C-alpha cells in the first residue's frame, strides 16, 4: 500500500487510509471545521491519485473506526458477501470506477458487486467520480423495496408527503396532507415530523394518517418520525402505522448521541414486522445527512462522506423501504453553499444506491445558508436524472415546523412532467380517479383538495 | 397596482390563497384556517402563481436577514440583565465556527462568577443563537412565567443573563461553572419563513463537557406562531420539576 505520490515537483505523503479518504474529498465546510480537509487543491488531487491505487482490500482492512471498538463497523464488515469480496478485493479504486462506468457493466452487476464492498470502499470510489460520473453510473441501478406498495420501479419518481404542523394540530396536518395529495404527493409515504416527541402525540398523529389512508383507500404507507423508542412504546399501546422511522449515524458513539443502539433497531424492526399495519417485508425508514457524526464529535477524524456511507452500510442490514439523506438540514458549518450541497446530494444518492438502498433525498437548505429556491430546483433536476427514488413534498417547499425549505408539491409535479416520470403505479391510478393527475401531468382538479372534503 | 401587490405580506398565510375554480370555497378557506402552511395557493401549469411565488421570496429574504441581525443593547438593558459573549467575534464566526460558539473565555467566565449567585437549583440564561429577533419577541413573557412558576414551587433560580453569539452547548460550560443542578438555555432557533422569531429551550441535568446531545430535554417552536411563550413556559416548569425529581434529562438508552 503506497500512500505517497508526486505532482508538479512536490511530494505528497499521507499517514493513513483515513487521511487519504478525507483529503480526497471534495471541499466541504464540515471537513474544514474538523481540521481534516486538504489544505490546497493540489493536495486534494494528490490524495485522489493515491486513493485511485488503493484496493478494495485496503479499504476493508482500514475501517474508519476499528472493528473491536465499534458496533457499526462490526455490522458492516460482518454483512459483507465474502464470495463477492474475495473476487474483487484486488481491484484498485481507479479500476473500480472505470468498471462502474463501463457500458458493459449493468446496474444488476453493480448491485451484486456492492454487496462485497465496505462503506469505506464505496465512499472511496465516489471521491474519484465527478458529478456527471455519479449520475451516469448511478442511474443504471434499479432497486425496489416493498411496504404496502413498491418503490423503485422504472420511470417512477415518488414523493414523501410531509404535512408537518408547528403543534401537531390534527386539522392542520389533514389540510396540508389533502393539499399535497391533490398535487400528486404522498406515494412514498405520508410522513409527519412531530413537534412533540411523546407517545401520546405519536399515537394521535398515527391515527390521523391511518384514518386518511383508510378513508380514501390511498395505496401508500404511513409514518410518524418520532424517536424509535417512542414509536415502539406507541405500538405497545395499540397504535398502528406502516413504517418505523429513525435517524441514524455512522458510528456507535454517534448513534448513542441520537439515543439509539443496534439491538434497539433490531427490536423495532421485528416489532413493526409483527405488529405494524404494513404488508412488508420492508418496514424501516431511515434518515441520514452528512456531518451528523461531526456535530456530536463522534466522527473519529473521518470525513463526512465516509461517515455518511457507514450510515448506508448500517441501513442495508435492516432492508429499509426508504432511506432519505436530509442533505441540507445540518447547516452551513457542514455544507456551506449550493455547490457543496449539490455535490453532497449526488454523492449520497449514488453511494446509497451502490449499497443497494432505495435512496431518496430531501433537497433542502436552511435560512443561514447562502442558498435559495433556484439552487434547490437545479439540484432536484440533477437528482431525477441520478435515479433518486423520492423527494419531499412540502407545501410550497416551506416546512413550518422544522423551519427549513425543501421541495414543494409544485416542484414534484413539474419534475415528473419534465422528466416524464410518474408516481408509483397504484397511487397514480388513485390520483387519476380523483382528477388530480391525467396523462402524466396534473389533472383538472389538481390543487382542489375540497374534492376530498365534500360529502 | 392590484390590491395584493400593494402589500404582499399583509395577509397571514391562512388568508393568502387562490380559490379560483375550487369546488367548495367554504371548505377551502376553513381548511386553510387550520395551518400556516402554504396550501391552497393555486398553480400555473405545475408551477406557482406569481403572487405566491413573490410572497415566498419576501418571507425567505426576511428570514435570511434575521440570521445576521444583532440583539440590540437596549433590549438587554430593558430586560435588566447583563451580557457576556462567546469566542465568536461576529455573525460570520457564528455560522462557520459552532465550536467557538460554545467557548466562554476566562474574562467572560469571571463576569459570570462576579454577577451571578452560585449553586442555584436552576440556572436560566438567554442566547441569540441563529435568530436575534427571538429574544425581544419571547423572553419577557417566557422568562417571567418560568421564574415565577419555579419560585412558587420553592425552587431557587440563578441570575439570568444574555450570551451573544451563543450556541446551545455553552450549557456544558456554564452549568458546571455556576454549580447549577439544572441548566436551561433559551435560544433563538433557525428562522423559518412563517416566523423569524422562534426560540427553543434546551434543558440539561448537571450538564458537562462530555455529555451526549441526547441528554438535553428540548422544547422547540416557541413563538406566537407556534407554542405561545406563556404556554411553553408552563411546560418548561413542569419539565424542570420532573428532571429535578428523576435527576436526569433527555432520552436515555436504558429505556
Image (cartoon, coloured by chain):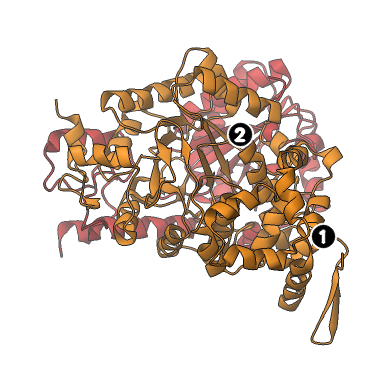
Residue at image coords 74%, 62%: A91
Q: Does dot 2 land on a helix, a strand or a loop?
A: loop
A334 left or right of A75 in image: left
Q: Chain of mark 1?
A: A
Residue A393 can be seen in this image: no
Of label 2 and label 1, which has the lower sequence position? Answer: 1
Q: Chain of mark 2?
A: A
Return the x and y of residue A148 as percentages of the image width and height.
41, 30
Residue at image coords 53%, 55%: A107
Vertical order, A166 against A127 (above or below): above
Question: Between A137 and A197, which is closer to the camera in this rendering?
Answer: A137
Residue with the most extreme top position: A237
Spatial separation of the CA atoms under disc 2 and disc 1: 28 Å
Q: Identify residue for label 2.
A: A318
B199 left or right of A123 in image: left
Vertical order, A274 against A118 (above or below): above
Question: Between B178 and A26, which is closer to the camera in this rendering?
Answer: A26
Drawing shade for chain A? orange
- Packing grade of label 1 (10 A; few <14, some 14-19, many >=20) is many
Residue with the most extreme bottom position: A9
- Is the residue at mark 2 from the same chain as the one at mark 1? yes
Q: Quadrant of residue A420?
A: bottom left
Drawing shade for chain B? red
Numbered circles on residues, count: 2
Question: Between B129 and A272, which is closer to the camera in this rendering?
Answer: A272
Residue A17 circle label? 1
Return the x and y of residue A129 as percentages of the image width and height.
62, 67
The quadrant of the rendering that contains the C terminus of chain A is top left
Amino acid at each position: 500500500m503506497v500512500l505517497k505520490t508526486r505532482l508538479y515537483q512536490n511530494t505528497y505523503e499521507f499517514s493513513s487510509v483515513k487521511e487519504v479518504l478525507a483529503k480526497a474529498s471534495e471541499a466541504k465546510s464540515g471537513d474544514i471545521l474538523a481540521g481534516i480537509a486538504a489544505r490546497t487543491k493540489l493536495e486534494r488531487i494528490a490524495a485522489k491519485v493515491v486513493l485511485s491505487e488503493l484496493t478494495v482490500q485496503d479499504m476493508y482492512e482500514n475501517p474508519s473506526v476499528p472493528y473491536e471498538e465499534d458496533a457499526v463497523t462490526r455490522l458492516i464488515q460482518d454483512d459483507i458477501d465474502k464470495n463477492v469480496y474475495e473476487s474483487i478485493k484486488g481491484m484498485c479504486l481507479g479500476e473500480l470506477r472505470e468498471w462502474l462506468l463501463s457500458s458493459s457493466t449493468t446496474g444488476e452487476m453493480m448491485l451484486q458487486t456492492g454487496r462485497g464492498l465496505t462503506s469505506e470502499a464505496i465512499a472511496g470510489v465516489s471521491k474519484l467520480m465527478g458529478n456527471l460520473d455519479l449520475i451516469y453510473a448511478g442511474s443504471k441501478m434499479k432497486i425496489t423495496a416493498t411496504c404496502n406498495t413498491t418503490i423503485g420501479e422504472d420511470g417512477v419518481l415518488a414523493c414523501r408527503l410531509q404535512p408537518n404542523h408547528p403543534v401537531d394540530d390534527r386539522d392542520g396536518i389533514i389540510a396540508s396532507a389533502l393539499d399535497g395529495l391533490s398535487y400528486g404527493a404522498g406515494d412514498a409515504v405520508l410522513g409527519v415530523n412531530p413537534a412533540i416527541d411523546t407517545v401520546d402525540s405519536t399515537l394521535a398523529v398515527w391515527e390521523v394518517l391511518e384514518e386518511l389512508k383508510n378513508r380514501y383507500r390511498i395505496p401508500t404507507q404511513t409514518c410518524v418520525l418520532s424517536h424509535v423508542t417512542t414509536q415502539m412504546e406507541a405500538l405497545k399501546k395499540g397504535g398502528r402505522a406502516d413504517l418505523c422511522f429513525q435517524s441514524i449515524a455512522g458510528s456507535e458513539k454517534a448513534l448513542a448521541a441520537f439515543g439509539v443502539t443496534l439491538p434497539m433497531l433490531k427490536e423495532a424492526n421485528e416489532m413493526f414486522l409483527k405488529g405494524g399495519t404494513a404488508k412488508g417485508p420492508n418496514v424501516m425508514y431511515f434518515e441520514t445527512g452528512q456531518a451528523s457524526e461531526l456535530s456530536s464529535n463522534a466522527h473519529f477524524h473521518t470525513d463526512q462522506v465516509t461517515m455518511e456511507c457507514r450510515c448506508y452500510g448500517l441501513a442495508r442490514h435492516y432492508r429499509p423501504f426508504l432511506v432519505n439523506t436530509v442533505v441540507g438540514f445540518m447547516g452551513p458549518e457542514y455544507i456551506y453553499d449550493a455547490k457543496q450541497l449539490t455535490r453532497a446530494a449526488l454523492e449520497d444518492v449514488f453511494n446509497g444506491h451502490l449499497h443497494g438502498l432505495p435512496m431518496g433525498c430531501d433537497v433542502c437548505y436552511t435560512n443561514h445558508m447562502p442558498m435559495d429556491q433556484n439552487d434547490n430546483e437545479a439540484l432536484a433536476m440533477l437528482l431525477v436524472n441520478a435515479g433518486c427514488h423520492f423527494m419531499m413534498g412540502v407545501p410550497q417547499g416551506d416546512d413550518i415546523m422544522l423551519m427549513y425549505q425543501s421541495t414543494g408539491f409544485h416542484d414534484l409535479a413539474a419534475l415528473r412532467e419534465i422528466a416524464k416520470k410518474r408516481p408509483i403505479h397504484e397511487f397514480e391510478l388513485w390520483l387519476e380517479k380523483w382528477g388530480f393527475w391525467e396523462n402524466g401531468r396534473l389533472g383538472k382538479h389538481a390543487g382542489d383538495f375540497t374534492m376530498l372534503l365534500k360529502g | 397596482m392590484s390590491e395584493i401587490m400593494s402589500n404582499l405580506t399583509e395577509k397571514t398565510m391562512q388568508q393568502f390563497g387562490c380559490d379560483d375554480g375550487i369546488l367548495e370555497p367554504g371548505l377551502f378557506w376553513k381548511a386553510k384556517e387550520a395551518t400556516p402552511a402554504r396550501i391552497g395557493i393555486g398553480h400555473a401549469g405545475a408551477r406557482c402563481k406569481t403572487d405566491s411565488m413573490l410572497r415566498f421570496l419576501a418571507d425567505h429574504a426576511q428570514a435570511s436577514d434575521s440570521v445576521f441581525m444583532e440583539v440590540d443593547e437596549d433590549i438587554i438593558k430593558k430586560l435588566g440583565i447583563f451580557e457576556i459573549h462567546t469566542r465568536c467575534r461576529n455573525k460570520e464566526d457564528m455560522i462557520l465556527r459552532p465550536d467557538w460558539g460554545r467557548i466562554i473565555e476566562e474574562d467572560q467566565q469571571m463576569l459570570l462568577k462576579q454577577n451571578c449567585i452560585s449553586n442555584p437549583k436552576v440556572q436560566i440564561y438567554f442566547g441569540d443563537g441563529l435568530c436575534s429577533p427571538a429574544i425581544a419577541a419571547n423572553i419577557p413573557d417566557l422568562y417571567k412565567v418560568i421564574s415565577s412558576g419555579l419560585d412558587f414551587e420553592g425552587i431557587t433560580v440563578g441570575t439570568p443573563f444574555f450570551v451573544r453569539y451563543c450556541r446551545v452547548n455553552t450549557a456544558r460550560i456554564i452549568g458546571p461553572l455556576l454549580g447549577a443542578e439544572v441548566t436551561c438555555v433559551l435560544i433563538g432557533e433557525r428562522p423559518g419563513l412563517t416566523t423569524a422569531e422562534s426560540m427553543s429551550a434546551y434543558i440539561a441535568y448537571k450538564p458537562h463537557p462530555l455529555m451526549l446531545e441526547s441528554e438535553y430535554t428540548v422544547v422547540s417552536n416557541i413563538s406566537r406562531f407556534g407554542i405561545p411563550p406563556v404556554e411553553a413556559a408552563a411546560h418548561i416548569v413542569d419539565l424542570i420539576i420532573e428532571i429535578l425529581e428523576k435527576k436526569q434529562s433527555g432520552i436515555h438508552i436504558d429505556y
